[in-house]
Amino acid sequence: MSEKILVVDDEEDIADLLEVYLRNENYIVYKCYTAKEAFSCIEQEEMDLAILDIMLPDMDGFSICRRIREKYTYPIIMLTAKDEEMDKIMGLTLGADDYVTKPFRPLEVTARVKAQLRRYKKYSGGGMEEEQGEILCYRKLKLNTKTYECMLEGEDISLTPTEFSILRILLENQGTVVKLEDLFHAVWKDEYYSKNSSTITVHIRHLREKLRDIGEKPQYIKTIWGVGYKLGG
């Protein structure tokens, strides 16, 4: 079954271009030019991924991202203006999984969509072969790699696919420092585009908040300055 992609951009040329490339990959594309149209589409259709422009005529893309994250965990890719670092960080802070800087290459966007959908399918258990389940534990934290459930002190913790992937890697390497570049490669696999450290930093911040681990001396995820992160040890 073809995945459903929501594209929200008031620049019709850009929305049309994305539609052409995504349909060439056999995705079903729902194209919206305003936030109002997007909200209506989100309520009526079960999406698999959303691509959101930040600048819209009636409301910014951040508001759409926030609304989606209130109910859904499917991947969100934000379209940001060139060199607008704060827009990128804001989008990630609100729950976006990735960002693309305008002007962009359509093939790059397609590659990111594919990568995010691979992770989401694995996370949600759809369309993938079942793997041998494993429970990863550290202190009062438990992660089930088959059911994709996370529990802290017996309480369910809701994670996005990207957050789950990062936490899984840290748990699998607990007590050992995972370098930033190794974490990038492990989470984003063979994607050819580069990222800066703010991407991982924001996702780590989300994880710490959800694990109630935001004090000066975190008990779970520790930052090794200039190197990467480790869990425990």
Image (cartoon, rainbow, N blue to C red):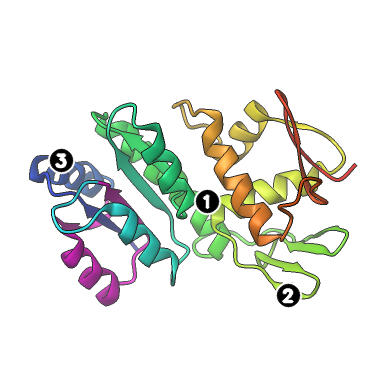
The answer to which of 146 and 204 lies nearer the viewer is 204
Residue 50 among magenta residues: yes
Q: Is residue 31 magenta?
A: yes
Asked if the residue under mark 1 is in contact with the one under mark 3, i.e. CB atoms within 8 Å, the reply is no
* Horizontal relation, residue 229 to residue 67: left or right: right
Sort mark 2 into few (<14), some (14-19) or many (20+) by Cα contacts within 10 Å.
few
Quarter of the figure that contains the C terminus: top right
Res. 43 in view: yes
Q: CA distance from mark 1 to mark 2?
A: 24 Å
Q: Which residues are magenta?
A: 26-54
Q: Secondary structure at mark 3?
A: helix
Q: Secondary structure at mark 1?
A: helix
Q: Is residue 14 above or below residue 225?
A: below
Q: Residue at (28%, 75%) from the top-left corner?
A: 43
Residue 119, label in figure: 1
- Whichever of labels 1 and 2 marks the residue nearer the N terminus, that label is 1
What amino acid is labelled 1 in the image? Arg
Q: Which residue in the protein does label 3 denote?
A: 14
Label 2: element kind = strand
Q: As displayed, is residue 78 above or below residue 138?
A: above
Q: Which residue is mark 2?
A: 155
Residue beneath the point at 88% across and 59% down: 139
Q: Earlier in the sequence, mark 3 or mark 1?
A: 3
Q: Is residue 127 left or right of residue 133?
A: left
Q: Amino acid at mark 2?
A: Glu
- Considering only order in the chain, which callout, 3 or 2, is on the residue closer to the N terminus? 3
Find out whether the residues at labels 1 and 2 contact each other: C-beta distance under 8 Å. Answer: no
Residue drawn at (36%, 58%) of the image: 65
